[in-house]
Image (cartoon, grey):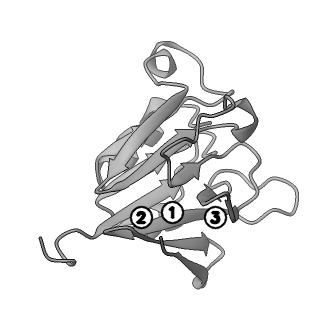
Amino acid sequence: MSEAAARRRVGVISDTHDLVRPEALRALRGSDLVLHAGDICGPDVLQALREIAPVIAVRGNNDHGPWADALPQTAMVELGSVCVLMVHDIKTLRPGATGGVRVVISGHSHRPSREVRDGVLYFNPGSAGPRRFTLPISLGRLDVTGERVRTTLVDLGRPRDARRAIIAP
């Protein structure tokens, strides 16, 4: 398989709190998959994202009702040879849960971040929903090619000001 064929572009969004911003939808266009790290707050958000690409979502602490009961607390996603673990609140991960995982995606804090600890990339896209305090309104992208993972954080107030980092094996 050629490297171009193995490339996956994944949109990462969290904490929409029942708000689907047009700029978020624009930023996610071209994604092969969208991962939502919880606090969706309504099924219409997932439907809007499904119009862009298939969606995998986990339940957040503000997701309630029959539609939310169908969502898992955590999800494992295989992106080629890269295993991604999704959870809403990173503090709820069980000890040892990251064994064999290359990327952990979380939300909850509304604070965009990425950091590598013990060989695992921890990626929080921030919040694409209503503004909270002075935190940015943001989302993220993962570009996965083989073992290589490139992350992008997109400030939806300044989409041209995306910050990138490359995490290689």
Give the residue pinned by disc 2: 28
Label 1 to label 2, Cα distance in Å? Answer: 6 Å
Residue 142: x and y in percent read 45, 66
Give the residue pinned by disc 3: 138
Dot 3: few (<14), some (14–19), or many (≥20) neighbours within 10 Å?
A: many
Residue at the image position 81 percent from the left and 53 percent from the top: 132
Residue at the image position 60 percent from the left and 26 percent from the top: 63
Whichever of callouts 3 and 2 sits on the residue coming sooner in the sequence is: 2
Residue 137: x and y in percent read 68, 63
Q: Amino acid at mark 3?
A: Ser
Give the residue pinned by disc 1: 24
Q: Secondary structure at mark 3?
A: strand
Residue projecting furthest to the right: 133
Asked if labels 2 and 1 touch by Cβ distance under 8 angstroms, the answer is: yes
Dividing the picture into quadrants, the one containing residue 43 is: top left
Q: Secondary structure at mark 1?
A: helix
Label 3 to label 2, Cα distance in Å? Answer: 11 Å
Residue at the image position 45 percent from the left and 20 percent from the top: 67
